[in-house]
Image: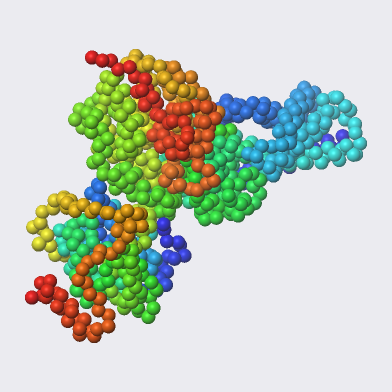
């Protein structure tokens, strides 16, 4: 065929362009801050991370996972064989037949991609992404036909000039999209950046079924605290942004987006891409930040992000619920990026919105967010006769009371839990006035200096006493104590176990330390707190415990790892960015949809947020309170 | 909030402003902090002359507190280093007399230490400058004169024109201070000047003890309507015996003041 001479040239040119584009792209990422990554181990682990970990997330959408396996697998296979057959001219009918099979597989996959794009859901980006299925079809079909002679199906001389011209156009278009586009920022960029992102992921612990959710500490001696410009991110964070496929699964689960607050995780990541490459967001073809027009954002690697690229309100809308991170098939870390940029706003600009500054000042001056006298921390337990660690020095269980001590609603939860501890004869003690805020809010508001100060002083207190485990009713304190204090302990220390109270009560019940009656009441549903569920993977204990009370949960559509945030995390109630709806109201709608009369929660923030929804609405109770109601007390 | 880059070192009025800063004390925890009124004085100064504002503290200069003032966006400050039991007045007066700023801003009263509220007045006496107390805002400087807004009880304001230089104490009614940012505060320079402090002999003899709350007379509000309650909460106390003299001659007015002072036993 006429193409025989031209084809290797075209493939070589496309490959060369891909390499040039890739090198340029890599240099964009390398503009970021250094971060040590084991390059070899990462690359070796990459196939497994792709085939197992990533696929595990993609598989939540069966249609798309099958489609992607066919299309992506078909393409990778085709490309390898194209190089062998058409570039190096390996004369083997076996290879040619394999190539035919691969392109056929890719074509079938591409047909499903095409079907999906006929009426795409709003979360998907349009623009160049609408072109992609056609490009895939053209690429697969063209190379199928071009390979036919090599497989001996048709004679090499078959077809006339017309067919040759059509095939030539197909080859140029197909190679252009698949190879040139991959290196130069087209939709196929995701394959190249995504593969490397998986290899050099900043949280390698997430692969192989692990979990890594604690925020990374700020070096307080650095010249700039937090991330001011795209260049301020670690290089592998920039790489992560580039891996985005704009599938919008993050957008679909983001509570702030649903509430009409000016945040869309997908757009945020795309804005980061605009920032790292330089330019404007005018080519972005997905949903905007609610209430903000697309096309006005402009940025570059050395331009301050919050001056023109991303409005600070966008960053402060996030509740750090991690729903986007959990859903992201590319395992991008949105929350890390948002907190990094918040750190700059708070630590360098002194610009935390609304009550942020006041809360931080209170945390600095009184160790609690509302400025109460530190000496009144134990007032709630005046009648509880609790043992203080400073008196006993040693106990099996350290009960971390948290700032719920200052809030009358939370005190009811604390009392309920104390009653359970006493009934089960648990050897426990509290820190009393020695306890301080865990630092959760300060950290999510970007003030890592205050977080570190609180953490270090708390650790100093904890190190004075002997205990086997810490139990707390506050999932935020739970997360911080469990995952974020380790960075500040002296080497080899801090190996205590941390329990959320639902886990702990569940253990007590299993050990028959508590006698429980059956729950008498209507239908019950359970709201998973983000910091217990997605952050720490505890979905079962609360459910087991409720089942123990004879409760058959009426599960919400969004529960477990897909639980929707109550709106109370990440300092969102403090920064209070206006939207069209309240996140807590939406969550209560979820509750109502199950027909439940009671929603069981395991977090005082969730309790406060959900009880803030106007009546009539289902009742809100902490699991500790529900268990206490069912407690059979022995009369002596 | 940090001053924008374009405002840096920009001093539209061309005047020299010094804000005196002290070690505050949180009412609940007793912990040292940025004092609320002094922070407002810094805020006023920043809005007036940007980063041209000079921060001045006499004492040991608790670093965390100093840096929390600096975190409002100032690259440096002056510390007149002396032991905490030394009197702040002589070193401040000496320094200010040497530097001759146009305007000195202070809080009304310190949150810790003696907290007598006398410092601005004593400084004014030493320097021979007028003192305006409890200001809420400062207007533009025109020909060496500036209009300040003095805060009076119940949200009232009095506009006063003052000729520079003068000392002003800043009321809580002034604009709330901007957030202090950790990074710039940490990087800012503290110019420490050793001074030979004068030991405050009177103060060393004192003993400090926590204040006791004074018993308060119960105020029974008999108001029936919300409007009445509002009035009771906001109206001026109907003190008897006051006299407003507007049309009398200056001599008559002065005589009335003198008579009152004699009557009250202030002058004998």
In the picture shown, does residue A618 fall above or below A294?
A: above
Q: Quadrant of residue A372?
A: top left
State the residue at coordinates (42%, 72%). Answer: B12
Q: Nearer the viewer, residue A115 or A28?
A: A115
Q: Quadrant of residue A152?
A: top right
Q: Nearer the viewer, residue A211 or B156?
A: B156
In the picture shown, does residue A432 fall above or below A101?
A: below
Is residue B136 something that shows in the picture? yes
Q: Is residue B256 left or right of residue A345?
A: left
State the residue at coordinates (37%, 26%). Answer: A624
Is residue B17 something that shows in the picture? no
Q: Residue A555 location, x and y as percent?
A: 52, 25
In the picture shown, does residue A242 fall above or below A508?
A: below
Q: Residue A585 location, x and y as percent?
A: 50, 38
Q: Residue furthest right?
A: A160
State the residue at coordinates (25%, 50%). Answer: B27
State the residue at coordinates (78%, 36%). Answer: A138
Looking at the figure, which quarter contains the N terminus of chain B? bottom left
Q: How is the image coloured?
A: rainbow
Q: Is residue B76 left or right of residue A99?
A: left
Q: Residue B196 location, x and y as percent?
A: 16, 65
Q: Nearer the viewer, residue A134 or A565?
A: A565
């Amino acid at each position: 065929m006429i193409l025989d001479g031209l084809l290797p040239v075209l493939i070589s040119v496309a490959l060369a362009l891909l390499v040039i584009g890739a090198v340029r792209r890599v240099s964009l990422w390398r503009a970021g801050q250094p971060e040590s990554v084991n390059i070899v181990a990462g690359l070796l682990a990459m196939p497994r991370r792709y085939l197992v970990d990533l696929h595990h997330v993609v598989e939540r959408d069966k249609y798309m996972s099958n489609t992607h396996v066919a299309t992506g697998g078909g393409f990778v296979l085709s490309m390898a064989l194209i190089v062998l057959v058409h570039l190096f001219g390996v004369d083997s009918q076996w290879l040619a037949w394999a190539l035919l099979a691969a392109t056929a597989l890719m074509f079938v996959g591409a047909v499903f991609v095409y079907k999906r794009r006929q009426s795409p859901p709003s979360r998907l980006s349009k623009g160049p992404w609408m072109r992609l299925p056609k490009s895939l079809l053209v690429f697969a079909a063209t190379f199928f036909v071009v390979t036919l002679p090599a497989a001996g199906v048709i004679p090499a001389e078959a077809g006339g000039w017309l067919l040759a011209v059509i095939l030539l156009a197909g080859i140029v278009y197909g190679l252009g999209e698949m190879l040139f586009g991959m290196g130069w920022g087209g939709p196929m960029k995701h394959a190249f950046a995504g593969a490397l992102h998986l290899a050099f992921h900043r949280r390698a612990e997430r692969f192989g079924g692990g979990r890594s959710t604690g925020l990374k500490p700020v070096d307080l001696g650095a010249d700039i605290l937090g991330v001011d410009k795209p260049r301020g991110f670690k290089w592998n964070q920039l790489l992560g942004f580039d891996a985005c496929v704009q599938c919008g699964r993050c957008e679909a689960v983001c509570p702030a987006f649903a509430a009409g607050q000016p945040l869309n995780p997908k757009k945020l990541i795309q804005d980061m891409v605009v920032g790292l490459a330089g330019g404007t967001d005018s080519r972005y073809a997905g949903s905007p930040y609610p209430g903000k027009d697309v096309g006005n954002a402009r940025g570059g690697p050395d331009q301050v992000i919050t001056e023109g690229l991303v409005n600070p309100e966008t960053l402060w809308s996030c509740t750090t619920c991690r729903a986007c991170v959990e859903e992201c098939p590319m395992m991008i870390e949105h929350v890390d990026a948002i907190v990094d940029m918040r750190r700059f706003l708070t630590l360098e600009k002194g610009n935390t919105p609304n009550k942020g500054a006041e809360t931080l000042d209170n945390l600095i001056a009184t160790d609690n967010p509302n400025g109460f006298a530190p000496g009144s921390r134990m007032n709630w337990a005046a009648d509880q006769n609790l043992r203080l660690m400073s008196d006993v020095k040693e106990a099996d269980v350290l009960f971390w009371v948290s700032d719920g001590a200052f809030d009358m609603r939370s005190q009811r939860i604390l009392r309920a839990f104390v009653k359970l501890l006493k009934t089960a004869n648990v050897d426990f003690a509290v820190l009393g006035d020695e306890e301080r805020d865990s630092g959760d809010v300060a950290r999510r508001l970007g003030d890592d200096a205050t977080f570190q100060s609180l953490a270090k002083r708390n650790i100093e207190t904890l190190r004075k006493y002997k205990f086997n485990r810490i139990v707390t009713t506050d999932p935020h304190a739970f997360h911080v104590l469990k995952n974020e204090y380790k960075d500040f302990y002296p080497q080899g220390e801090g190996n205590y176990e941390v329990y959320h109270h639902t886990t702990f009560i569940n253990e007590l019940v299993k050990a028959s330390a508590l006698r429980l009656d059956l729950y008498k009441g209507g239908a019950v549903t359970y709201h998973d707190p983000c910091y217990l569920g997605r952050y720490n993977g505890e979905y079962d204990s609360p459910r087991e415990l409720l089942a123990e009370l004879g409760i058959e949960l009426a599960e919400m559509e969004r529960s477990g790892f897909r639980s929707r945030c109550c709106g109370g995390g990440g300092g969102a109630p403090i920064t209070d960015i206006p939207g069209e709806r309240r996140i807590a109201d939406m969550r209560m709608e979820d509750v109502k949809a199950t027909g439940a009369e009671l929603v069981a929660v395991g977090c005082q923030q969730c309790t406060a947020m959900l009880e803030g929804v106007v009546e009539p609405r289902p009742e809100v109770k902490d699991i500790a309170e529900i268990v206490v109601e069912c407690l059979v007390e022995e009369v002596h | 909030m940090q001053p924008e880059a374009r405002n840096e070192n920009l001093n539209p009025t061309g005047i020299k402003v010094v804000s005196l800063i002290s070690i505050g004390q949180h009412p609940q925890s007793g912990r040292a902090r940025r004092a609320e009124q002094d922070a407002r004085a810094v805020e006023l100064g920043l809005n007036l002359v940007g980063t041209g504002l000079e921060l001045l503290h006499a004492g040991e200069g608790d670093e965390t507190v100093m840096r929390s003032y600096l975190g409002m966006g100032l690259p440096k400050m002056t510390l007149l280093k002396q032991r905490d039991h030394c009197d702040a007045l002589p070193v401040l007066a000496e320094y200010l007399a040497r530097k001759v700023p146009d305007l000195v801003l202070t809080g009304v009263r310190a949150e810790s230490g003696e907290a007598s509220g006398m410092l601005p007045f004593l400084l004014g006496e030493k320097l021979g400058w007028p003192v305006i107390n409890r200001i809420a805002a400062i207007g533009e400087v025109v020909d060496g004169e500036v209009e300040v807004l003095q805060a009076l009880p119940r949200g009232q304001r009095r506009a006063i024109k003052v000729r520079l230089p003068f000392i002003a104490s800043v009321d809580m009614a002034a604009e709330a201070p901007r957030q202090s940012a950790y990074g710039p505060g940490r990087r800012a320079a503290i110019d420490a000047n050793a001074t030979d402090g004068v030991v405050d002999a009177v103060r060393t003899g004192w003993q400090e003890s926590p204040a006791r709350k004074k018993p308060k007379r119960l105020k029974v509000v008999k108001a029936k309507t919300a409007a009445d309650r509002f009035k009771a909460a906001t109206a001026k106390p109907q003190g008897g015996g006051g006299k407003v003299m507007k049309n009398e001659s200056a001599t008559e007015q002065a005589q009335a003041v003198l008579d009152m002072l004699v009557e009250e036993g202030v002058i004998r």
